[in-house]
Image (tube, rainbow, N blue to C red):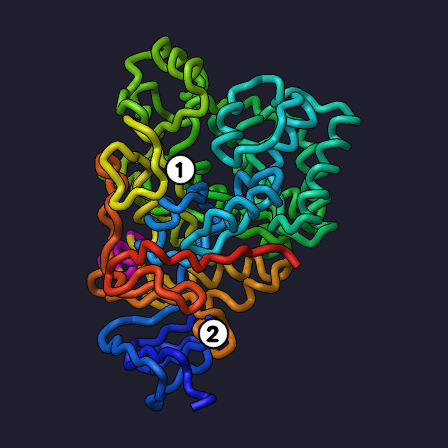
């Protein structure tokens, strides 16, 4: 009895992408840890029959800006067990970790240090705080995008060093939001990351095809930093920053990898992006670089498509941090869809949702409400990214095997982090001794329901989702009282 697992998942299709296991097995769980994966039946204090369902390590989302309870719940119903805010990051990370711990979270959570907020503080005197939403509120301010003096750059780097010492999971760099910054500054940030042994997570500068006068091509800059500094450079949402130039960008990444550069890539399966409408690249006179006009934007708060440049600039001035859909690739167009597919199916591409905070179109925000009211709006990728990958690329097009998709949804993300974050070595795997962050799902039924018009419809097909061995989804329903999420820190 002393060796008996607390819980046994009986008779499921066990999937471990690291060892290649794909076989019927029992999975034993005790004290939040997988104790056994056995082809022979296991006895347990409790036994849950999962015959006919797949059992896999839970999805790890290394690109989520949706760090509230409501955001976690949407992502839990998409099979996610760990959500990390790495591209934008936060400052101060200690406050972000403290707030999440005090409020409780259904899923595991973690944060990188924010180059954007460090720069806002060091260059423009904008007090850091408020996380991703706080940064978006200042995103259109020209002062923080100004050239940094030597003293300001030193202050910026000192802020980032302090955040790394507080457990930040690397450095998030929104270079695409300040594309006139001296490329030498990016190299200095990458050198800092290399010295600390952590990755950078970059929203790249524009490509020369769209902005010929950019100080340096965004893709060239990222891979150059990897080659010159030895830093691990993670290329965020390569689909949305490369758009129709994705083949050139992927070829460049492949060449640098072949030469020993550490570059990883990430993508999500949607043709539209989303960010604050005040972003530099969404100014009316810069939209041509994305191949779109004002009417390709949809202001989330009202659903309005700006009729012309003047109206777009009115909204940008009034609500620079207001979220907006950015329709760049037409998912109904086979040619556009092919660009998206190539970004996502490229070798070793990690699935990252770029999940967004909720926009409340009426009434007071209530991040604990469930089910979410129709007044809560987000990008459908918040609720559906991982399930859409399983539906489209495994079941419908068969471009990925189920085991390969499971790897892209979890193991590959864990491998990005684990050299500097030992806790991640126990995630993304279905093996004895690993964390019992697990998804139990029906491969033939799992799928996304969220759309641009109904963005908070949860995904389906997940029978159970466990975080540290505790169910956050049971029999397809959220366990609203479950808050087992734990912090993921460096070191």
Q: Nearer the viewer, residue 126 or 221?
A: 126
Span shown in magenta? 388-397
Seen as rendered, the residue at the extreme left is: 445
- Left or right position of 225 against 263: right
Quadrant of the snapshot with the N terminus: bottom left
Rendered residue at 67%/48% (across/down): 166
Please identify, in this view, whether the residue under mark 2 or under mark 1 is nearer the observer.
2
Q: Mark 2 or mark 1, which has the lower sequence index? A: 2
Of 21 and 363, which appears nearest the observer?
363
Quarter of the image where one finds residue 239? top left
Q: Is residue 451 visible?
A: yes
Q: Residue at x 21, y 65 (%)?
A: 444
Please state the total of marks drawn on the protein image.
2
Residue beneath disc 1:
357
For disc 1, the neighbor class at 10 Å (few under 14, some 14 to 19, many from 20) is many
Q: Is residue 307 left or right of residue 108?
A: left
Q: Report x, y in % for residue 292.
A: 35, 24
Residue 346 in view: no
In the picture as drawn, the residue positioned furthest to the top comes out as 310
Residue picked out by circle 2: 31
Residue 164 in the image, given as x and y percentages of width and height: 68, 47
Image coordinates for residue 111, horizontal then vertical, percent: 55, 47
């Amino acid at each position: 009895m002393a060796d008996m697992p607390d819980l046994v998942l009986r008779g499921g299709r066990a999937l471990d992408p690291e060892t290649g296991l794909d076989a019927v097995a029992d999975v034993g769980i005790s004290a939040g840890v997988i104790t056994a994966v056995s082809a022979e039946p296991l006895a347990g204090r409790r036994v849950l029959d999962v015959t006919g369902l797949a059992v896999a390590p839970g999805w790890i989302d290394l690109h989520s800006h949706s760090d509230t309870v409501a955001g976690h719940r949407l992502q839990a119903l998409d099979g996610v067990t760990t959500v990390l805010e790495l591209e934008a990051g936060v400052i101060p990370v200690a406050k972000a970790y403290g707030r999440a711990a005090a409020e409780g979270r259904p899923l595991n959570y973690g944060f990188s240090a924010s180059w954007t907020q460090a720069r806002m503080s060091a260059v423009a005197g904008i007090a850091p705080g408020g996380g991703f939403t706080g940064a978006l509120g200042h995103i259109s301010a020209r002062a923080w995008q100004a050239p940094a003096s030597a003293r300001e750059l030193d202050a910026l780097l000192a802020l980032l060093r302090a955040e790394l010492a507080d457990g930040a999971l690397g450095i998030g760099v929104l270079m695409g939001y300040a594309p006139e910054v001296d490329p030498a500054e990016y190299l200095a940030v990458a050198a800092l990351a290399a010295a600390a042994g952590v990755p950078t997570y970059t929203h790249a500068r524009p490509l020369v095809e769209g902005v010929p006068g950019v100080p340096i091509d965004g893709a060239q800059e990222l891979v150059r930093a990897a080659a010159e500094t030895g830093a691990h450079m993670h290329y965020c949402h390569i689909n949305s920053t490369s758009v129709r130039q994705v083949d050139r960008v992927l070829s460049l990444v492949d060449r640098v990898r072949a030469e020993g550069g550490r570059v990883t890539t990430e993508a999500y399966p949607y043709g539209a992006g989303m960010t604050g409408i005040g972003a530099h690249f969404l100014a009316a006179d810069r939209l041509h670089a994305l191949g779109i006009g004002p009417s390709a934007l949809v202001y989330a708060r009202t659903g309005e498509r700006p009729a012309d440049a003047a109206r777009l600039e009115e909204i940008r001035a009034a609500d620079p941090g207001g979220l907006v859909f950015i329709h760049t690739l037409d998912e109904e167009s086979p040619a556009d869809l092919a660009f998206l597919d190539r970004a996502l199916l490229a070798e070793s591409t990690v699935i990252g949702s770029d999940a967004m905070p909720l926009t409340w179109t009426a009434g007071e925000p209530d991040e604990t409400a469930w089910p979410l009211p129709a007044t809560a709006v987000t990008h459908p990728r918040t609720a559906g990214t991982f399930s859409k990958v399983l539906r489209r690329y495994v079941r419908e097009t068969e471009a990925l095997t189920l085991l390969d998709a499971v790897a892209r949804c979890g193991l590959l993300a864990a491998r990005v982090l684990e050299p500097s974050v030992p806790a991640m070595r126990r995630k993304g795997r279905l093996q004895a001794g690993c964390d019992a962050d697990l998804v139990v799902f029906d491969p033939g039924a799992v799928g996304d329901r969220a759309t641009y018009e109904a963005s908070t419809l949860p995904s389906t097909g997940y029978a159970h989702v466990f975080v540290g061995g505790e169910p956050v989804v049971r029999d397809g329903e959220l366990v609203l009282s479950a808050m087992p999420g734990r912090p993921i820190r460096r070191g």
